[in-house]
Image (spheres, grey):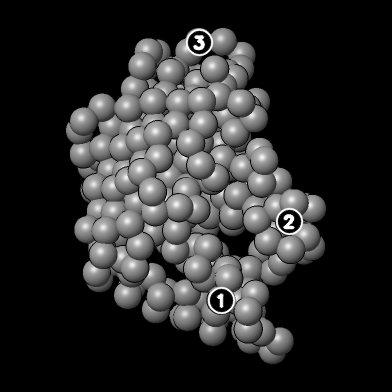
Amino acid sequence: MARRILMLVLSIVLALGLAAPVALGQVGQGAKASGKAGELVAAWWQWALSKPAEENPLIGDYSGGPQCDGEPVTDVSGKKWFLGGSLSEDPVVRTCTAPVGTQFFFPVVNVVIVPFPGETEEQLLEQANEVLDAQLAGADIEVTVDGRTIKAKRLVRADTGFFTAEVPEGGLLDPGSYQLVAAGLWATLPPLPPGEHTVHFEITGAGFDQDITYHLTVVKGKSARGR
């Protein structure tokens, strides 16, 4: 029971951050999506849980460093970088550098559940979406890029089937292999032009508060590193 509760609490406070990229299919748009969007959700959780605490981009303020490192990977849908979260309700300001041409994918509200023995995928998805519905019903959400609110079509609700995430020593949870199911409301940003950009995320009324600002420098080149 404790591990399951921990995962639910952890999911509630994951909001916005910058992370390594992932190569998967085109993210769906609209009120509900599955397929490749669900694959991205699973891959995001695998990434978020794969980093040790000292390198984890979900923890604290930072300016560059390992939280921002990543080599962009390209497939038929282009380059994708994950945006992640904060484990604190305190205001967070972060500075990172990203390669030109990358699309950004991150959770607005996010739920993940560890199954009890015998629970089915269908049962877990129902539970995850019930929690998500409750969070969204009470939430006041704002996501802006350079002071402009992102369009509704950039938000997608997506969930996953069973997937496995590996947690290392010194990670956010006890080390080991976790089987999970996740659901959430996600944002997708198109590639930003070269230069300085500000991404701001704020949420209240969903059982937690988040106030996070990212100063992103988009640069040309084969890779981008935290500065």
Which percent across, then down, holds residue 19?
Answer: 56, 37
Q: Residue at x 68, y 61 (%)?
A: 173
Lower sequence index among marks 1 and 2:
1
**Label 2 to label 3: alpha-carbon separation:** 33 Å
Asked whether the residues under the numbered discs 3 and 1 touch, taking CB atoms below 8 Å apart as contact, a structural biologist would say no
Which percent across, then down, holds residue 218?
Answer: 44, 18
Return the residue at label 1: 5
Residue 202 at least partly seen: yes
Q: Residue at x 39, y 78 (%)?
A: 130
Numbered disc in front, either 3 or 1:
1
Q: Amino acid at mark 1?
A: Ile
Return the residue at label 3: 220
Residue 203 vs residue 93, the one in the foreground: 93
- Mark 3, secondary structure of its residue: loop
Q: Return the mark for residue 167.
A: 2
Lower sequence index among marks 3 and 1:
1
- Horizontal side of residue 8 vs 49, given as left or right: left
Residue 200's image quarter? top left
Q: Amino acid at mark 3?
A: Lys
Numbered disc in front, either 2 or 3:
2
125 in relation to 157, above or below = below
- Mark 2, secondary structure of its residue: strand
91 in relation to 184, above or below = above
Q: Amino acid at mark 2?
A: Val
Residue 84 at least partly seen: no
